[in-house]
Image: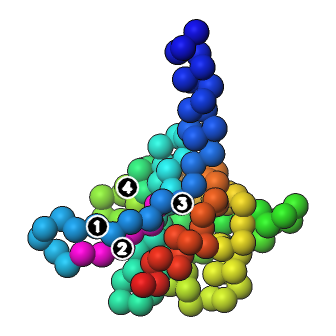
Amino acid sequence: MKKIFLALALMPTLCFAQWTYKRVDNGLDDPYNIAYNQNKQGSILKLENIEGEICFYLSNGYFCEDNPITEVAFKIGEQWSKFEFRSAKSTDNSALFLTFNLNGDPILTQAFKSASMVRIRVNDGICGSDIYDFSMGNSTNAFNFMLK
């Protein structure tokens, strides 16, 4: 009975992940801020500040095409706000850079901060299409933390 109660108590945490942010100090590089959000399938959305520009990327997948078209839809209230990117994959095929400057477009930034959910469809001409869903809880705090 205790195991069932514990599983039910933890379920909301596991099902509704949200943005987490922290300062990283690995002892080798200058400390830096990172924000991330992991969905229940293990895929991770990340934010990193690279010289004042917020890089927004998807990792923990396998991407075949060098520059796939990626659709990103933010759910704001009952409406969807859709954006399309020509993304770039990492050299090891494990990450897909959706945009190198999330804070460069005020409409995109506002959608990111206001959304309750984001759905990403990667239209990979070689490997096929995949859809990734993430909760956007705590996204405003994560974004603002990355600007520090």
Q: CA distance from mark 4 to mark 1?
A: 21 Å
Q: Where residue 43 appears, x then y in whole percent?
A: 48, 49
Q: Amino acid at mark 2?
A: Asn
Amino acid carrying label 4: it is Ser
Question: Which amino acid type corresponds to the residue marked 1 in the rendered image?
Answer: Val
In the picture of the structure, the residue carrying the numbered disc 1 is: 24
Q: Residue furthest right?
A: 78
Q: Percent position (x, y) of residue 48?
A: 40, 74
Q: Which residue is mark 4?
A: 94
17 horizontally vs 43: left or right: right
Left or right relative to 108: residue 17? left
Q: Which mark is residue 33?
A: 2
- Nearer the observer, 55 or 141: 141
Mark 4 or mark 2: which comes first in sequence? Answer: 2
- Rounded to the nearest angstrom, the CA distance separating label 3 from label 2 is 13 Å
In this view, the mark in front (4 or 1): 1
Cα separation, mark 4 vs mark 2, equals 21 Å
Q: Residue at x 46, y 84 (%)?
A: 147
Q: CA distance from mark 3 to mark 4?
A: 20 Å
